[in-house]
Amino acid sequence: MNRCDIFIAGAMKCGTTVLYDWLCEHPDVSGCLPEAGADRGKELHYFTLYQSRGLEWYQGQKLHPERPHWVDASPTYGDLCLEQDCLERIKEYNPEARLIYVIRDPLARAISHYLHLRRINRLPEVVELNAEEFFNAALAAVDSADAEDSLTVLTQRVLSFSLYEAKVRQLHAVFGAERLLVLDNEDLRPAQVSETMTRVWRFLGLNEHASPQQKLVRYQLGTAFSEVSLRLQGRLRAFFGEDYLRAHELAMRLGVGPGRAVAADAAVPLRCGMRRQAATVGRAGHVFLDGGSNDPFGMYSADGAWGAELIAAWQFRLAQRIALGRQKGWAYWHLIVPEKATVHAEHAPYAYDPAAAFGDRLHAALTPEVRQQVVRASGLFRQRRAAGLYWRSDSHWNQRGAGLACQLLCARIGLRVPDQLFGRGQRPVPWPADLGAMIDSARREDGVWWEVPRHAVRTDANALVERHEAGGGNDVGLHVGSVVSYRNEQAPNDVRLLLFGDSFCEYRPHLLTGYLAECCAEVRFVWATSLDLDVIDAFAPGIVVAAHTERFMHRVPDDTWRVAAHVQRVLAARPSGAGAPR
């Protein structure tokens, strides 16, 4: 008896149909007989749903009896393997069988599952619920294990089918590393599919067979993430994320995932939807800040804390600063530093409208008099994003991004930018970004470092900078309140510029502070979002710029804040020689 020896064991909505079609194109592999009216006989579900039909019926489902191999792609074999002994029955049926298990971004899989349920229209209560209502009900019922109504059972199944780790463990326990291969849906995309199928043919012991179908648009799976709100996407990713991460790690440790087995302490490549602490991995390896005190993804919704009340408060503060500057003899400019997610929505793990970012909504709502003093960089940054303006492994812009912001800001203010400011003295650097380290301590990114500044010289630094530099570490407690001054005898603009900003500016000269120091005769940088009027009066600038990163705009700054008092408090709390708090 020529028994089925290749099984695609799920998961549902993860690309099993695509993989089945490609395998069936191999001249040595048969698919299954289609049912009447169907174009393929992919899902037999014999070992989970239809074993009562008997082995003779199952053996009769082979489409091409003359071919030596036979593939059965039934997602229930993986999806239900923790509820039934279907894997044991498959192994008893054919001890030589090989299984392929395909997983997918768990949120994408769950939404596709929900849309599938709506299409088949089995339960009116599902059809009556939109995706937002369905998944809110699903999350609410997670702790209600005793609920037995059909809707609760169904919502919990949609969630459970997107949890993979325990299933990978069970698949391995029954079939071992030699007869199990775990793939990700991303491995089936055109950019990776050639390498993936080479691995598949090798796993099955078959000669390679290229298929033109692998490049067709109809095989490029997509998901309507916009079916659910941004906040609900975040809740679902938090629910799924750790399991997805552990499933990938487990597959690699067991040697059944993509590539070779890795040691227990080795770094495992991450996938879309991974989340640890405040970091989330999106598409193409980009890491985004998610969570923490700033709620960065919350700002793409006009509801709640990022809504009309915050916009009104900012309108008042900006108008106040502009009026004060005119009274005191300096021009005030406000640079809205775009969040990475505002520029690179295509790489983010959630679906949202980047044009709904708080900075864009604020800029549109300002009165014309205030708006003309506010520099909104998001539009230009989105146009130029292909140039790589942000680190992949962090939320910060890189030197290209800071340089573009400098050009934009100077153009709006009316300052000249010196020749050969950007890209001078390039050298490669490995970037140990903070967010990347949250996910993988060994995560590094190869980048480019430019020599900035060229002519500007640092002339002064306050006690916090001196303490920071003497300590040699990245003590975040010494950042706010840092003050440095630069003088440039060859600057193209004879102007004194006072810059208030944060880590997108830096007291060190490699970002916006250093670029502006090359443009202006004197630049003083204060690490703060608030304006210190004492510092302004002492420096007597012609221009005051506040560079405010979007995610930090959830609070309107208090301009009664003073650097001197803050520094005194910090130094009193950190005696000389004391390091960062543990």
Image (cartoon, helix red, strand yellow):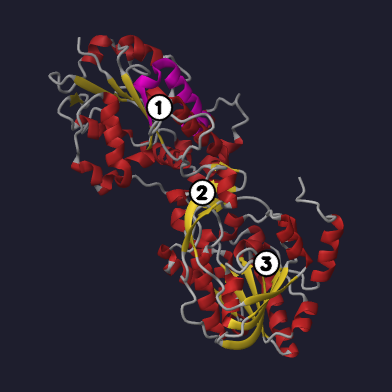
Question: Residue 354 location in percent, x, y?
Answer: 49, 62
**Which residue is label 3 attached to?**
310
Please indicate whether residue 287 sits to the left or right of residue 21 in the image: right
Q: Is residue 424 above or below residue 503?
A: below
Which contiguous range is marked in magenta? Answer: 153-182
Left or right position of 194 against 564: left
Q: Which residue is mark 2?
A: 444
From the viewer's side, name the closer residue of 561 and 444: 444
**Which element carries disc 2, helix, strand or loop?**
loop
Work out whether 331 lies above or below 573. below
Residue occupying the point 61% across, 48% down: 278
Residue 235 is at least partly visible in this image? no
Label 2 neighbour load within 10 Å: few <14, some 14-19, many 20+ = some
Amino acid carrying mark 1 in the image: Val
Q: Quadrant of residue 521?
A: bottom right
Q: Count the numbered circles shown.
A: 3
Q: Is residue 163 magenta?
A: yes
Q: Name the residue tied to disc 1.
A: 256
Q: Residue at x 85, y 55 (%)?
A: 575
Whole-Å distance between the Cαs marked 2 and 3?
37 Å
Eye-nearest disc, 3 or 1? 1
